[in-house]
Image (cartoon, grey):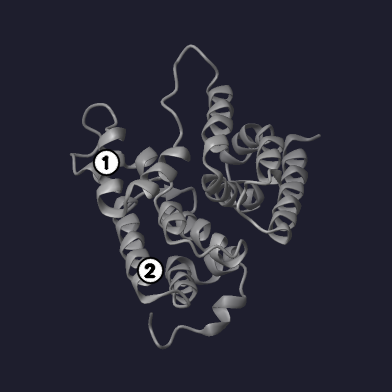
Amino acid sequence: MEATTPAYLLTMPLHAITEVLGEQGLRDRFALEIHRLPEDDQAVLTDAMELTARLHEGQRRVREPYLNHVLRVAIRIMCYYHVTERDVLVAALLHDAVEDQPWRLAGMPDKEGPAPHDAALAEVERRYGARVARLVDAVTNPVYTPDRDHDEQYLEHVVESLDAEPWARVIKVSDFTDNGVGIVHTTGPKVMRAAVKYTPLVPLLRELVSRPDTPLPGEVKTHIFRQFDLAEQRFRAILGE
């Protein structure tokens, strides 16, 4: 972390940092957040962040580098959910790596042949351990079958995978918040597509978060429920309901 990194970054909303300071601002905020953790954890999380940056290099989310989304997901878990579990934070950084960049993660030529998901997960386990690989697997979208609606398969997968992995719920909720509540920072056809896809997901996530085994304190769950309410309000406005 640079000595000149302004401490007021800790007071700024994540999308404000994104709009004003871009990727470097989010990197600086991430460095400030992990600076509170033990040195060993800082080293592992910095390594995972740099790996994620390499994996998603050149990938974009409409108006921004993809890394911005990944950083916001991890920072939100630390800042707003008060989670400092290293494995959870590493998995948050890598939550889209197996789904979007399995060839790079597995050390194979980009997009040659079928997506090597198993090899990519094996590399996550080799680098960061079995628990991280299990969490990443739980938040990775399935390989869809062409004879069924993709959104239905997505919802079924979310419920099934998160039912068995309470800590993966934390990662998925932060990911959803960035995509759902953050939908107002998106432009183009993705706005309507996201509203259609995520509207039926909200009650499912709400039920999962409310479970006693979801490892978050009550005040954090209350904060998340308010975020769900806001996402639903925005989806209804987009869909004209």
Numbered tag placed on residue 122 in the rendering = 1
Badge 1: residue crowd in 10 Å (few <14, some 14–19, many ≥20): some
Q: What percent of the width, then of the height, locates residue 207? A: 70, 39
Q: What percent of the width, then of the height, locates residue 165? A: 52, 41
80 and 129: which is toward the camera? 129
Indicate the amino acid at tag 2. Asp
Quarter-wise, where is residue 200 in the image? top right
Q: Which residue is drawn at 57% across and 42% down?
A: 188
Indicate the amino acid at tag 1. Ala
* N-term mark: 1 or 2: 2
Q: Which residue is drawn at 57% across and 50% down?
A: 170
The residue most toward the bottom is: 3
Image quarter hosting the C terminus: top right
Element class at badge 1: helix
Q: Which residue is drawn at 40% across and 42% down?
A: 134
26 and 49: which is toward the camera? 49
Q: Which residue is drawn at 74% across and 46% down?
A: 234
The residue most toward the right is: 241
89 is higher (above) or lower (below) than 241: below
**Residue 71 left/right relative to 117:** right
Element class at badge 2: helix
Quarter-wise, where is residue 192 in the image? top right
